[in-house]
Amino acid sequence: MEIQQASIDIMRLSGFAEAWRQLLQSECPQDWCRLLPDIDISSPDRMLEPKTLPVLKFLPRLASGAPLPYRGVIDRLIDARDTLHFGQTYSEEDFGEDFLSQYGWIKLLGPDAYWHSERLSSGFLILGDSNTYPQHRHQAEEIYLPISGDAQWYREHDGWQQQPAGTLIHHPGGIEHAMRTQGEPLIALYLWRGGNLMQKSEIC
Ligand SMILES: [Fe+2]
C-alpha cells in the first residue's frame, strides 16, 4: 500500500513538473532555458516530505483567474498539492505572521529541490490577495513570470508598476525589488541563476 502511494505521489509530482518545464521552455529566454539540465521528469533526484501552507487556500482562485494558457500548470499544482513540500524563506521575526499566512513557494529545481541543479533554481512563488513582499535583494539574477493575478512590482530606479500575467520581469543580481497584491492573489514562475542559489535575501 505504501509503495502504491509513493508511486501515485511521484506521478502527481511529475505531472506538475512536466507542466512547469513546458512553461519554462515556451516562455523563458533561451539563455536561461539552456541552463535547464536534461532531467528525467518521471524520476526526481529526491523526494521531500509533504508540507502544506496557509497560502494554498488561494490556489482555486488562482486557477480560475489565470489566462487559459496558464491554467493547466495551476491545475497540475492543485492535483499534486498534498504530496508537495511548500516552503517559506522567512520567519515571523522577518515580516510578521500576516505576511507568512499569505506567502510561500514550491521549488522544483535547485541544489536542494526534487531535481538537482547547482546552476539554476526554479519553482513558483505564491502570494495571497493582500500582501506585500517587502524590498529585498540577493546575489542571484532572477526572472519572474506571473501566471495569475495582476500584482504590483517594484524595482529599484523604476518604482512600482502593475504587471499582468504573462509579463516577464527581470531583476539583475543585487537590485532592490518588491511586490504587493491588492485584491487578487499572485502566482509566478521564478528562475534564479548566478550567485548563491541558497542565499536568504537581504531585507532592505
Ligand atoms: Fe527576488
Image (tube, grey):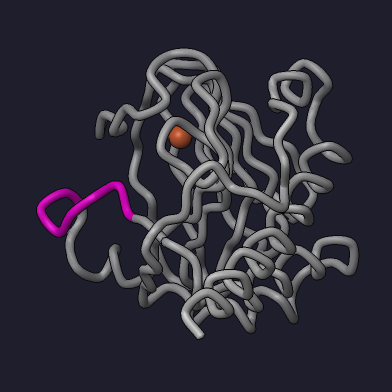
User: Is residue 120 or residue 58 the one in the foreground?
Assistant: 120
Q: Name which quarter of the figure residue 198 lies in.
A: top left
When the figure is inspected, residue 129 is found, relative to residue 85, above or below; the finding is below
| Depth check, front residue: 204 or 37 | 37
Q: Quadrant of residue 49?
A: bottom left
Residue 42 vs 50, above or below: the answer is: above
- Stretch in magenta: 88-94
Of 15 and 164, the residue lying toward us: 15
- Rendered residue at 47%/25% (across/down): 156
Relative image position of residue 34 (x, y in whole percent): 77, 19
Residue 13 point in image, percent of width and height:
62, 62
Q: Is residue 17 visible?
A: yes
Question: In x, y percent, where is residue 177?
Answer: 45, 33
Residue situated in front as seen by the camera: 116 or 32: 116
- Which residue occupies 60% across, 60% down? 187
Instruction: Specify whether residue 47 is painted magenta.
Output: no
Residue 92 falls inside the magenta stretch: yes
Q: Is 180 rendered above or below residue 81?
A: above
Residue 154 pos. (x, y %): 50, 38
Left or right: 48 in relation to 41: left
75 w.r.t. 13: above or below: below
In percent of the image, x 63 and y 83: which residue is there?
A: 60
| Side of 163 where 127 appears, left or right | left
